[in-house]
Image (tube, grey):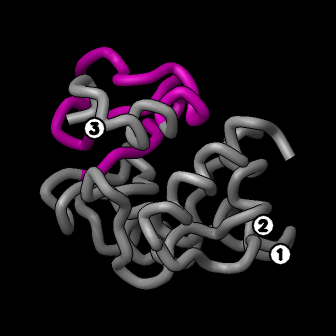
Amino acid sequence: MEDWIKEAIAFWDECEVKMNPPATAADFEKAETILSFSFPDDFKALYAVVNGFYGYEWQEYMFSFWSLDRIIEEFVESKNKNIIGFCDFLIMSHVIGFKRNTVGIFNDYSIDCEPIALTFMEAIGMINSGSREIY
């Protein structure tokens, strides 16, 4: 397991966040088929260890990482089909996710702007440190 994943999980453990068991290959295939989107390798690496937070759990900075099933559910319900959310702040104050056909991680309110992070791994570090740029 990569160090950044160990650090993320250790932080979530400190926050007493309940996490879901790992996603399976079938879980990834289902999500990618429904979403018509291929998740980046760093996303898959983390979700192969922890499939998001249980229910609406959140970490110290009030961010909740969604399970693959919730990612699908939120996408289906969303009017904006250009962003694939994986995380929300303060119970849907805003969503953080991938933008179709664009490298990077975006806030749903800034989708037409520059990404807040270039990789999922970088976004995890920013979110778990409470970086100002993530808000």
What whole-number distance in Å separates the C-alpha atoms at marks 3 and 2?
25 Å
- Compared with 59, 96 (above or below) is above
Left or right of 53 on screen, residue 93:
left
What whole-number distance in Å separates the C-alpha atoms at marks 3 and 1?
28 Å
Given the image, on which type of amino acid does mark 3 rest?
Asn
The kind of secondary structure element at disc 2 is helix
**Quick one: label 3 or label 1, which is nearer the N terminus?**
1
- Residue 29 is tagged as 2
Task: Indicate the quadrant containing the C terminus: top left, top right, bottom left or bottom right.
Answer: top left
Residue 63, image x, y percentages? 32, 56
The kind of secondary structure element at disc 1 is helix
Question: In the depicted view, which residue is nearer to us: 6 or 54?
Answer: 6
- The residue segment tinted magenta is 95-123
Q: Residue at x 30, y 28 (%)?
A: 131
Q: Which residue is mark 1?
A: 26
Q: Residue at x 28, y 65 (%)?
A: 78
- Residue 107 is tagged as 3
Left or right of 73 on screen, residue 96:
left
Confirm or deny contact between disc 1 and disc 2 (CB under 8 A): yes
